[in-house]
Image (cartoon, grey):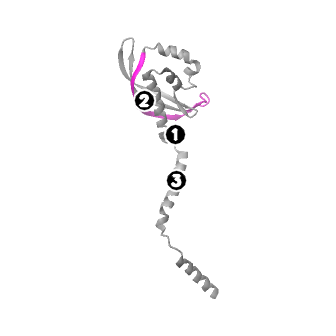
Amino acid sequence: MDRRRNQKEEIQLFESTSPRIPLTAYLPFLVAVPLIVLILQACSVLPDSWRNVFEENSVRDAAKEYLEAEVNRDYEKIYRSLAPSSSYRSTTGYDSYLAEAASSHMKIVSYRIVGISRIDSNLDAREFPNVEKIAQVDTDVVIRFENSNQQMEVNYGFIFIKEGGRWYKG
């Protein structure tokens, strides 16, 4: 009996001398840890359409780079913006492209990116093994026909593809 009493007194003595931390002090930790775990799990199972929010800035940057090169007629930059695996770039060397581009009577005068209407995973990896994702960038483009000096505005959906972690004009 004495032994139990001594143990009880020791426990009471320990409890009375240890500092009391209110449970509310643990609240941020108790909320943050499960929330972080939940977010990490959610990111791994999110459908492509939700995860694509993270890709939009990269696609938009690639589209701006390409369209600015078109407006400025920076042929080298335009050629570098074309996807290496595209049928055009894989069959057309830079010199051939340059001759073709220089003889064109059409010029993009200005553009406005309206939005990115879709970003999808490559659903045909057998046919296009280097392509990771495909995006469509919707634009309003003003085109000038230099042989007649006429202009017109068109709404055009440019296709961009992701290869090797980088977005290119498809």
Query: Residue tagged by mark 1?
Result: 48
Read off the residue under disc 3: 36
The three-letter amino acid code for the residue at tag 3 is: Ile
Query: What amino acid type is highlighted by mark number 2?
Result: Asp
Residue 33 visible from this viewpoint = yes
Compared with 41, 27 (above or below) is: below
Q: Position of residue 32 (x, y in %)?
A: 50, 57
Q: Position of residue 28 (x, y in %)?
A: 48, 60
Q: Farthest residue in the bottom direction?
A: 2
Residue 126 picture quarter: top right
Compute the Cα span from label 3 to label 2: 35 Å
Which sits in the foreground, 4 or 75? 75
Q: Is residue 9 above or below residue 81?
A: below
Instruction: Give the residues in magenta.
Output: 106-132
Q: Residue at x 39, y 14 (%)?
A: 146
Would you name the residue on which mark 2 appears? 138
The mark that comes first in sequence, 3 or 2, is: 3
